[in-house]
């Protein structure tokens, strides 16, 4: 029974988030205040609450003075125009245009409240305009005050810390998927069939972290390096997509080796030259793994060990082993194998460059926030033995 109650509570939390509950509470309070002081129309106060409810703490605080300024300006402008020029649909449209232009000029983002305030006030009956305008303005200010108070007192948890923790974990896990795809490619020599690994869970986590970023970005300051956060999101997406590409190369390689038209020597393993090439891919995988660990640790502090990447010396040796293999084999079959190796090498080069640039951005941060349990992800990978022969 207790388990059922907890499950029901969890489901309710997914349906009724903090902002939904805050909005309902704010509307109720605004209507009660208007009813208590006989201020009409109370619906204007309720609508103002809905417009001004903010999703995060920092957004509520940073927008508070902007909302107050816009509202005061809109109310003053509407009352002045209503008393001097009058009201009709054409005048209301022109004043709305002026309000939007002024807000854009000043860099204000919460112009919707100003527009609503202008419409509410200028739509007052002409014969008793000032009385109705003041009453409507008072309703708007009541709604604004209620919304700002609830945003401040009952604000939801901050998003920034939660986003960073989720993002850092995804960087590690998505890179692990990419590194595993390299291992699968090298180790697929003796396989009769291969079912490629699909990163469904990682893709879902990437969507969640990206959505969380849209909320958290309001809380970022100049010291938080938003460029780094965006680069890391791009890195996670690249690890997932490119790891999936290598998984597809592995599937095609196994299928090609088992095809009836494959050369007779395919049943005898792989050549010594190709084995050397595969072994060197594993060397590159190890370098990328160490680079990933350095990047991950840099989120907490600057690692003391020198950064190692897939530099020109690595690629010179890689090209040498590729040439040694290609000197002894030719034909359509081996051309396809060459294309597969080229794809794998391209993805490795991408990973090295992107992780290095992310690392350089990370260590330039003025303040490094401590990350709980940051070292638990830095586990040693088991050794991988090469295949037989291609």
Image (cartoon, rainbow, N blue to C red):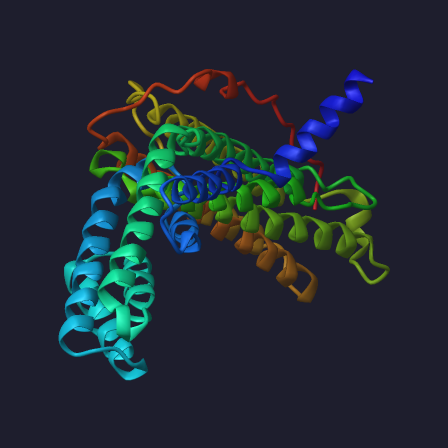
The image quadrant of residue 277 is top right
Q: Is residue 317 visible?
A: no
How far from the left and from the top, in percent, is residue 198? 69, 45
- Residue at the spot x=22%, y=48% of the render? 68
Q: Is residue 97 left or right of residue 1?
A: left
Residues 116 and 332: in front is 116
- Residue at the spot x=24%, y=80% of the render? 91
Q: How many numbered discs sit on the rendered protein?
A: 0
- Residue at the spot x=39%, y=38% of the render? 56
How far from the left and from the top, in percent, is residue 130? 22, 64
Residues 238 and 282: in front is 238
Point out the residue furthest to the bottom here: 90
Rendered position, 89 above or below 195: below
How far from the left and from the top, in percent, is residue 32? 45, 40
How far from the left and from the top, in percent, is residue 267? 82, 47
Q: Pick the quarter of the image with the N terminus.
A: top right
Q: Is residue 376 left or right of residue 102?
A: right
Residues 364 and 342: in front is 364
């Amino acid at each position: 029974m207790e388990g059922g109650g907890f499950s029901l509570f969890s489901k309710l939390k997914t349906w009724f988030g903090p902002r939904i509950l805050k909005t309902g509470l704010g509307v109720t309070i605004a209507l009660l205040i208007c009813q208590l002081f006989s201020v009409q129309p109370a619906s204007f106060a309720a609508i103002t609450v809905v417009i001004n409810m903010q999703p995060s703490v920092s957004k509520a605080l940073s927008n508070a003075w902007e909302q107050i300024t816009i509202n005061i300006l809109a109310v003053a402008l509407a009352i002045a125009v209503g008393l001097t020029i009058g009201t009709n649909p054409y005048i209301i449209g022109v004043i709305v245009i002026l309000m939007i232009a002024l807000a854009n000029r000043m860099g204000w983002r919460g112009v919707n409240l100003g527009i609503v305030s202008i419409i509410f006030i200028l739509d007052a009956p002409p014969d008793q305009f000032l009385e109705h305008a003041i009453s409507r303005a008072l309703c708007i200010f009541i709604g604004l005050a209620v919304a700002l108070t609830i945003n401040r007192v009952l604000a939801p948890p901050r998003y920034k810390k939660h986003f960073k923790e989720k993002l850092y974990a995804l960087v590690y896990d998505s890179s692990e998927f990419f590194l595993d795809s390299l291992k699968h490619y090298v180790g697929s020599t003796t396989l009769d069939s291969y079912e490629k690994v699909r990163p469904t869970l990682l893709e879902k986590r990437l969507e969640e972290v990206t959505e969380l970023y849209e909320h958290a970005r309001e809380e970022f300051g100049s010291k938080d390096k938003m460029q780094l956060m965006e680069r890391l999101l791009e890195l996670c997406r690249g690890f997932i997509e490119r790891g999936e590409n290598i998984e597809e190369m592995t599937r095609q390689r196994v299928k090609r080796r088992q095809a009836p038209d494959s050369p007779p020597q395919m049943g005898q393993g792989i050549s010594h030259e190709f084995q050397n090439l595969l072994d060197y891919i594993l060397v590159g995988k190890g370098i990328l793994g160490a680079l990933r660990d350095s990047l991950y640790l840099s989120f907490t502090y600057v690692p003391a060990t020198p950064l190692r990447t897939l530099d020109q010396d690595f690629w010179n040796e890689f090209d040498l082993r590729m040439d040694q293999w290609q000197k002894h084999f030719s034909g359509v079959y081996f051309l396809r194998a060459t294309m597969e190796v080229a794809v794998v090498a391209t993805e490795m080069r991408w990973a090295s460059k992107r992780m290095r640039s992310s690392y350089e951005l990370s260590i330039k941060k003025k303040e490094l926030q401590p990350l709980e349990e940051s070292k638990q992800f830095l586990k040693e990978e088991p050794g991988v033995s090469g295949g037989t022969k291609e």
